[in-house]
Amino acid sequence: MTKSTLLCVNLLAISSLILCSCGDDGKVIEANGSDYSKTGIFSDNKSAESSNSESLKTDSYKVKAVEVLQTSKYSYLKVEGEGDGLSVGDPYWIATLKNDFIVGEEYIYTGRLLKKDFESKEFSRIFDKIYLVSFIEKANGLTPIKSTIEGVVTIADLVADPMGFTGKKVKVHGQVVKVNDSIMDRNWIHLVDGSADDYDFVITTNVSVPVGHTVAFEGLISTNRDFGAGYKYELLMEDAVTIK
């Protein structure tokens, strides 16, 4: 973990998490498989009629916490900022695994599931609308990772000149923040190195790396790749191997 005190909630490393409505009210959201980017890992085991769930989101949203409610296991955050279908500045609620969230701090989250009429018995209230969130971190909180490996290129360099690196093998070094294992016969690693804010740099590999690990990869840079099924990337690294 870097000095940024990255608030990764570790949901991505858990394959059987159960999220009740933070009050044991019987509304259960549980993990299903390891395609963390699409849910993050939440899938609804209730019927569509009872859950009132929208399509799962994979976009990133930058928000500011305006209120924080804590339970023994989960954190409820009232936030304002980015979000589909919301007016600018219109606050809304998200819920995630418990962590030291601070009112006034800015966060970036991905992987959310909308729940309507969501009851929390612990708070004796019903949330008209709340998002269950699988991954959240402090905005711009990652200190740039310094590498002792010769020839490492920063993600910022790749983003600044993708065509200049296309078709070339390069080395990158960063922290794993998301993992999608065994999709299209490869693993999909999401890496940050602190050089490009919250840019979502994706690596395909046969290697399995847990979320939270800092690791160096070497692979081929590709641009404008469309694998179908929503896996479309302007920039990514393919067929990567880890560097010891």
Image (cartoon, rainbow, N blue to C red):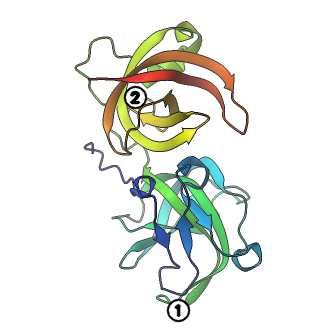
Name, please, the residue furthest toward the left: 148
Q: Position of residue 229 (x, y in %)?
A: 72, 39
Vertical position of residue 96 compared to residue 40: above or below: below
Q: Nearer the viewer, residue 173 or 46?
A: 46
Specify the amino acid type for callout 2. Ser
Q: Position of residue 98 (x, y in %)?
A: 38, 68
Q: Position of residue 11 (x, y in %)?
A: 43, 58
Specify the amino acid type for callout 1. Ser
Mark 2 to mark 1: distance in Å?
A: 44 Å
Name, please, the residue furthest toward the right: 49
Please name the residue shown 40% across and 23% down the image.
241
Q: Nearer the viewer, residue 34 or 141?
A: 34
What residue is disc 2 on?
195
Please name the residue shown 62% across and 63% down the image.
113
What residue is disc 1 on?
124
Vertical position of residue 116 compared to residue 168: above or below: below
